[in-house]
Image: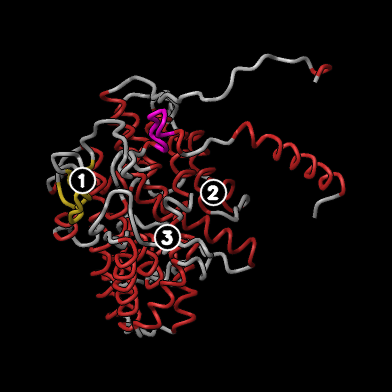
């Protein structure tokens, strides 16, 4: 509740803001006039290249001789390997561990290296002494991404030489964060539910013999039980979210911050803040909420006329949040297909059949088909479902609460953040400083008493 002073101040500030709009507004045509790439995007929507990398390639289109974008089937390449091949050939539910090794070191480990690396991770599962009590249980947060940030920066105080910038020390700190993020995410969720909603406080300490995917399910479930297939599906989700090129917002944020010479913990906090946004990692929450309303109104009906009416209402800004956006569709790079979505669709189908709810999967599949069809009818361009469309569905079938959807993205993506942070330390010591074009006026200062 605001007091009268707050209300008065708000009115004053509102008047200031109204007057300032003349001085702050920048019209979109000016970006073309001055040849400035708004948001580091070209006019055709493709990204402006801002660096070189050997970590990952995101393939969503090709270019013809004139430079025009030609849609193609999407692929995601980790250190030269397609995510499709990595997923198809992983060892049980340790695919994420192998993926982390690949991203950090640049090659696939042999059996001995793989086992040693798994031990390096499991030896670091546990949080520092009293960290759980002092940093999480005594200070719960309503937003788990914010809590992940505060815990990350707190780990700075527990590290030996936390400001060290050499590659080896950065790798050690990165591996430590990869190992500890699952516990921080799970504990922060239960601390929130216990403190704000008076639910039972469940604390399962991570088990060293479990993979990261197994431990997440173990820590989240009161009985600690899960099936091999459930662990396999979550492991696949972690692999799919582990990396997505140097140009995505959270990774770019990490590289920009890392280029200043700041510590890894601060750079990771910047990435978490970026990923939290609903236009980036938080998009899976938007998809989940949209689908909840659609399912409530359709009861999983696959009547194409009914689904068509809903999709058209969304596009006409007359349904859900009236934004005109069908969340979970479209991507800045992928055109015909998002390979992550293609893989998740298959995993969701198998999981839905195992759990005895194939009609839920069929509904998602039908809705996807109708969105693609209707959007193409309207704009004559293909649109694909992206990773966020099926990820929330998969998490829900695994019994993972919505609060953890985006933190799980961070638990996965930290592998890519660290890989790019290390890579940029190795090949470029310059601070990243893109330029902007000033288009405001040059004015003569007038003393306060004469204004």
Q: How many labels sit on residues?
A: 3
Q: CA distance from mark 3 to mark 2?
A: 19 Å
Q: Height in image: 273 above or below 394?
A: above
Residue tagged by mark 1? 78
What residue sits 46% from the left and 44% below the top?
274
Q: Which mark is residue 147?
A: 2
Residue 351 location (% of width, % of height):
29, 75
Question: Splitting the image into 4 quarters, where does residue 104 fall?
Answer: top left
Frontmost residue, 147 versus 312: 312
Secondary structure of residue under mark 3: helix
Residue 349 location (% of width, % of height):
26, 75
Residue tagged by mark 3? 284
* Residue 51 seen anywhere in this rendered image of the structure: yes
The span picked out in magenta is: 31-39
User: Mark 3, mark 2: which one is toward the viewer?
Assistant: 3
Q: CA distance from mark 2 to mark 1?
A: 29 Å
What residue sits 40% from the left and 34% below the top?
32
């Amino acid at each position: 509740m605001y007091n009268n002073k707050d209300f008065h101040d708000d009115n004053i500030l509102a008047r200031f803001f109204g007057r300032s709009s003349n001085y702050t507004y920048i019209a979109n045509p000016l970006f073309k006039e001055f040849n400035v790439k708004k948001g580091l995007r070209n006019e055709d929507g493709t990204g402006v290249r801002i660096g070189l990398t050997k970590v990952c390639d995101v393939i969503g289109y090709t270019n013809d001789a004139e430079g025009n974008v030609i849609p193609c089937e999407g692929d995601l390449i980790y250190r030269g390997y397609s995510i499709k091949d990595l997923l198809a050939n992983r060892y049980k539910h340790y695919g994420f561990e192998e993926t982390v090794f690949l991203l950090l070191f640049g090659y696939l480990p042999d059996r001995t290296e793989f086992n040693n690396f798994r031990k390096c991770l499991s030896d670091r599962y546990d949080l520092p002494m009293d960290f759980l009590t002092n940093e999480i249980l005594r200070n719960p947060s309503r937003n788990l991404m914010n809590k992940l940030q505060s815990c990350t920066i707190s780990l700075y105080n527990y590290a030996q030489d936390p400001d060290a910038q050499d590659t080896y020390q950065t790798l050690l700190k990165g591996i430590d964060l990869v190992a500890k993020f699952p516990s921080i995410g799970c504990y922060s969720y239960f601390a929130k539910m216990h403190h704000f909603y008076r639910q039972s406080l469940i604390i399962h300490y991570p088990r060293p013999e479990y993979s990261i995917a197994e431990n997440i399910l173990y820590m989240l479930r009161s009985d600690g039980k899960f099936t091999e297939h459930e662990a396999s599906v979550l492991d696949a989700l972690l692999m799919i979210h582990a990396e997505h090129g140097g140009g995505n917002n959270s990774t770019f944020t990490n590289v920009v911050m890392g280029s200043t010479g700041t510590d890894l913990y601060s750079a990771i906090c910047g990435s978490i803040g970026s990923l939290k946004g609903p236009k980036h990692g938080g998009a899976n929450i938007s998809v989940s909420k949209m689908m909840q309303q659609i399912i409530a109104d359709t009861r999983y009906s696959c009547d194409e006329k009914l689904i068509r009416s809903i999709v058209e209402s969304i596009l006409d800004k007359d349904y859900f949040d009236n934004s005109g956006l069908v969340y979970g569709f479209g991507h800045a790079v992928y055109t015909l297909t998002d390979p992550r979505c293609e893989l998740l669709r298959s995993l969701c189908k198998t999981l839905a059949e195992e759990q005895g709810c194939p009609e839920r999967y069929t509904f998602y599949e039908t809705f996807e088909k109708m969105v693609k069809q209707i959007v193409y009818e309207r704009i004559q361009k293909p649109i694909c479902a992206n990773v966020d469309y099926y990820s929330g569905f998969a998490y829900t079938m695994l019994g993972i609460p919505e609060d953890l959807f985006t933190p799980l993205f961070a638990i996965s993506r930290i592998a890519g953040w660290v890989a790019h942070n290390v890579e940029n330390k190795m090949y470029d010591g310059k601070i990243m400083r893109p330029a902007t074009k000033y288009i405001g006026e040059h004015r003569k200062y007038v003393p306060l008493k004469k204004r």
